[in-house]
Image (tube, coloured by chain):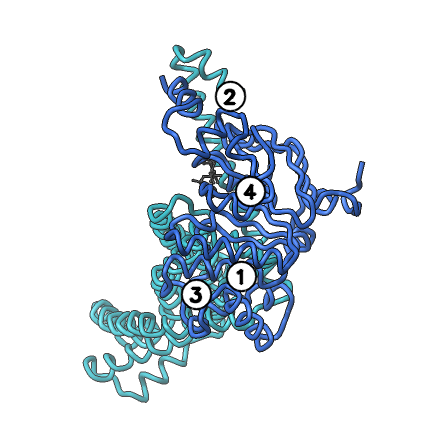
């Protein structure tokens, strides 16, 4: 139907332009629809039994344990640089005393979840997209269905569960390591008394600072796993398709993390 | 008219009626009709890219035909999803063209996959059954703990075969079981297919370009050309079918109606 009309009016540029706009719009709607259906199915399998404890455990180790060094290093140096920067900055209006507070609040609210999210997106999102994408193009996903195993249940749900549960834990550990980094710089380079620094760290910290960070982390973990699975699941066309899926998974997860980070912050802290 | 779950004892094991499937403008299946009786071994031959794999995927529900009906044991299967589809597929074993072994699992778990995941057999019992299946396809037990990437192509095909028969299905599909194997290994696989299907008493639907394999494993042969089955007949008759297209294909000649039509279309 569409083909015939296109052929009949080939000469008219205006119509062709509209046809292109229409096609792009349809492709976009199709993508959104496909993504929504995927998300719906993924979530429904994530919360409904049966579960696969072995697969969930394997993904938890992959996400939680093996990401520790990366996340630890990132937050350690972020804590250190925060202490240094805020000290030199605040010295201009004699507010050096706020260093400890600034370090802990920026880490727990913002830097911990965002940095850990971005690092894990690069590490885990890419790995998920590549693994599931390869399974798609080598027909392993088809093979799953013929063996009466639902690919959503077997591949997607364990990754989502592991992402949602492991990222908050990672961020909690990262927060502690980052605060420790600030403490080391504060006490060794900036001349803070260790006891004062610790007291200052605890003094203005509220539960909501930490909790909001952990909620962000859970959301980011979900987004990372969802993007990895979605792009892998819909990849096609051999090695090139898997490569594209991997890139798309990391880029889309990173962008979503930054957007959602703003939205969640606004939800919690905007008055 | 049969209801969706009606089961008729006289119905063929597998009945395809006017199955059509296209990808965009590319019409792949253009009205396929085929009956396969219980215990029969049917072979579908046809050139590369004629839609043989698509046909199997339609029956398995991996692709959804645009129209037509596919009945297994007299019950309609087109459009089934979820549990209902799983119940149908539990009766079907499939050897994929590229083996499609799970590369994150060792060989024995690949073979036992349908038992462990589909039927909740204990891992211990499933491993024992997997070992039996590996024996059946002539693989040594020490490959059981290797990973698929550590096997040669022929060994992967055999593991795929073991996986297809592990759950003792009533219907087995073999997608190009001998492609890419040396002639001796190909014949070993042919023997295995004949032996395993006889042993299971299963209905088999195989796809191949290899005429030696087709005549060895098939009771009947059908040729797929331009989206239709242009010839169906007993395996012994395939070399004097009286159909010019079939003749060209089975004798592997470069000159004949198939190449002429392709050139006419291109030119
Ligand atoms: N998922 C798909 N999307 C779009 N086109 C497809 C898809 N799967 C198959 N096709 C097209 O359908 C046609 C038939 O493909 P199919 O894999 O069934 O061929 P075949 O007969 O199995 O060939 P071979 O003997 O080489 O395996 C091809 O033209 C292919 O491009
Ligand atoms: Mg094929």
Chain A: its colour in the image is: cyan
Left or right of residue A240, residue B258 in this image? right
Mark 3 falls on what kind of element?
loop
Q: Residue at x 52, y 51 (%)?
A: A142
- Find disc 4 in the rendering and name its residue: B43
Q: Quadrant of residue A126?
A: bottom left
The answer to whether residue A171 is seen in the rendering is no
- Find disc 2 in the rendering and name its residue: A2
The disc at residue B104 is 3
- Find disc 1 in the rendering and name its residue: B163
Q: In this orientation, which residue lies closer to the viewer: A24 or A234? A: A234
Q: Are marks 1 and 2 on the same chain?
A: no
Q: Residues within 10 Å of mark 1 (few under 14, many from 20)?
A: many
* Position of A70 relative to B29 (above/below): below
Mark 1 falls on what kind of element?
helix
Q: CA distance from mark 2 to mark 3?
A: 44 Å
């Amino acid at each position: 139907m569409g083909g015939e009309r296109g052929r009949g009016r080939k000469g008219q540029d205006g119509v062709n332009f509209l046809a292109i706009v229409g096609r792009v719009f349809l492709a976009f709607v199709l993508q959104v629809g496909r993504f929504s259906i995927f998300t719906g199915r993924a979530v429904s399998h994530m919360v409904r039994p049966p579960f696969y404890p072995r697969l969930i455990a394997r993904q938890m180790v992959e996400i939680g344990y093996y990401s520790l060094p990366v996340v630890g290093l990132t937050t350690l140096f972020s804590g250190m640089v925060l202490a240094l920067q805020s000290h030199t900055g605040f010295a201009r209006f004699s507010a050096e005393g706020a260093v400890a507070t600034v370090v802990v609040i920026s880490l727990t609210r913002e830097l911990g979840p965002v940095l850990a999210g971005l690092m894990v997106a690069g590490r885990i999102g890419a790995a998920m997209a590549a693994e599931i994408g390869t399974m798609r193009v080598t027909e392993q996903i088809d093979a799953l269905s013929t063996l009466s195993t639902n690919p959503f249940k077997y591949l997607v749900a364990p990754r989502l569960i592991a992402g949602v549960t492991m990222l908050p834990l990672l961020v909690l550990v990262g927060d502690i390591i980052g605060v420790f980094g600030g403490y080391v710089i504060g006490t060794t380079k900036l001349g803070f008394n260790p006891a004062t620094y610790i007291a200052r760290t605890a003094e203005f910290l509220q539960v909501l600072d930490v909790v909001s960070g952990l909620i962000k982390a859970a959301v980011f973990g979900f987004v990372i796993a969802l993007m990895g699975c979605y792009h892998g699941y819909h990849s096609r066309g051999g090695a090139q398709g898997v490569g594209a899926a991997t890139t798309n998974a990391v880029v889309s997860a990173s962008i979503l993390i930054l957007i959602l980070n703003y939205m969640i912050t606004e939800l919690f802290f905007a008055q | 008219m049969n209801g969706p779950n009606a089961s008729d004892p006289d119905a063929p094991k597998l009945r395809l009626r006017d199955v059509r499937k296209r990808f965009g403008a590319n019409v792949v299946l253009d009205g396929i009709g085929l009956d396969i009786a219980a215990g029969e071994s049917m072979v579908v031959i046809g050139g590369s890219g004629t839609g043989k794999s698509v046909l199997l995927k339609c029956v398995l529900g991996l692709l959804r035909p645009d129209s037509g009906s596919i009945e297994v044991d007299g019950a309609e299967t087109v459009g089934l999803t979820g549990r209902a589809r799983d119940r149908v597929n539990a009766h079907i074993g499939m050897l994929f063209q590229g083996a499609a072994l799970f590369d994150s699992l060792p060989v024995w778990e690949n073979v036992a996959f349908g038992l462990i995941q589909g039927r909740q057999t204990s891992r211990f019992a499933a491993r024992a059954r997997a070992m039996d299946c590996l024996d059946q396809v002539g693989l040594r037990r020490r490959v059981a703990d290797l990973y698929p990437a550590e096997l040669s192509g022929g060994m992967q095909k055999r593991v795929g075969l073991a996986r297809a028969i592990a759950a003792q299905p009533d219907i087995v599909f073999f997608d190009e079981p001998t492609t890419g194997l040396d002639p001796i290994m190909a014949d070993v696989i042919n023997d295995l297919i004949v032996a395993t299907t006889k042993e299971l008493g299963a209905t088999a639907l195989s796809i191949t370009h290899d005429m030696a394999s087709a005549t060895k494993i098939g009771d009947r042969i059908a040729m797929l050309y331009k989206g239709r089955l242009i010839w169906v007949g007993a395996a012994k008759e395939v070399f004097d079918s009286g159909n010019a297209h079939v003749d060209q294909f089975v004798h592997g000649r470069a000159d004949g109606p198939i190449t002429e039509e392709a050139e006419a279309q291109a030119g």
